Image: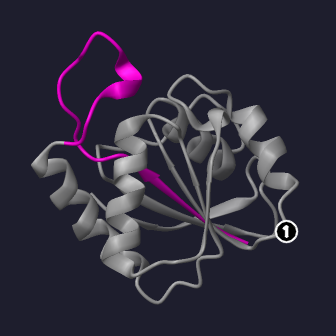
């Protein structure tokens, strides 16, 4: 299985309602740059947070790649989501090449747990950064870091 984790691009500063924050122009550029690393990858599905900045990030990726494949929005990808729930959800999927578009601190906690086998060492991910993980299954400590941008 190959799992790509993409943190949304730079977003506008805080607003009254965090889920409504938009990407900045810089955020769009950083996402477009890192999306190129996915060129040629056999992505089967994009799973995306419902927050506006994540949806806009996914749109930039789709445009950069010409991706017309499966696309789903899930509440278990929001910033304060639990990695355990993500692992349960991913374990149920039949696809073997998945892109998650999500947020910190969730994405760092999930990546660290999948690679290190514990939650004490989350992976640092700046806005727009992309991480590739590969392994036999989505399970704590059973995935290897195969690429990281920024």
> Would you say the magenta stretch is mainly helix, strand or loop?
loop
Relative to 86, does residue 44 appear above or below in the rendering? Answer: below
Check the image and name the residue furthest to the top.
16
Q: Residues within 10 Å of mark 1 (few under 14, many from 20)?
A: few
Span shown in magenta: 1-23
Task: Say left or right for 55 vs 92.
Answer: left
- Residue 122 in sight from this viewpoint: no
- Classify residue 77 by image quadrant: top right
Relative to 21, does residue 128 appear above or below in the rendering? Answer: below
Check the image and name the residue furthest to the left.
25
Query: Does the magenta-highlighted stretch encompass residue 22?
Result: yes
Q: Secondary structure beneath disc 1?
A: loop
Task: Say left or right for 4 vs 6.
Answer: right
Task: Say left or right for 99 vs 8.
Answer: right
Location of the N terminus by quadrant is bottom right
Residue, x 72% and y 41% (percent of image)? Answer: 86
Relative to 129, does residue 87 appear above or below in the rendering? Answer: above
- Classify residue 136 by image quadrant: bottom right
- Classify residue 14 by image quadrant: top left
Residue, x 15% and y 42% (percent of image)? Answer: 24
Q: Which residue is mark 1?
A: 94
Given residues 45 and 144, the one toward you in this image is 45
Residue, x 73% and y 69% (percent of image)? Answer: 135
Given residues 96 and 12, the one toward you in this image is 12
Task: Say left or right for 121 vs 1.
Answer: left
């Amino acid at each position: 299985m190959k799992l790509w984790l993409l943190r949304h691009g730079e977003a506008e500063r805080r607003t009254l309602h965090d889920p409504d924050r938009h990407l900045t122009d810089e955020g769009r550029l950083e996402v477009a740059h890192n999306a190129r690393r996915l060129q040629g990858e056999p992505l089967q599905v994009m799973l995306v947070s419902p927050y506006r900045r994540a949806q806009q990030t996914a749109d930039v990726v789709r445009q950069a790649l010409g991706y017309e494949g499966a696309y789903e929005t899930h509440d278990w990808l929001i910033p304060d989501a639990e990695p355990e729930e993500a692992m349960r959800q991913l374990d149920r999927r039949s696809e073997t090449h998945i892109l998650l578009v999500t947020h910190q601190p969730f994405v760092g906690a999930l990546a660290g747990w999948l690679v290190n086998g514990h939650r004490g060492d989350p992976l640092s991910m700046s806005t727009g950064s992309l991480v590739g993980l590969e392994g036999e299954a989505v399970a704590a400590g059973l995935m290897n870091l195969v690429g990281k941008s920024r």
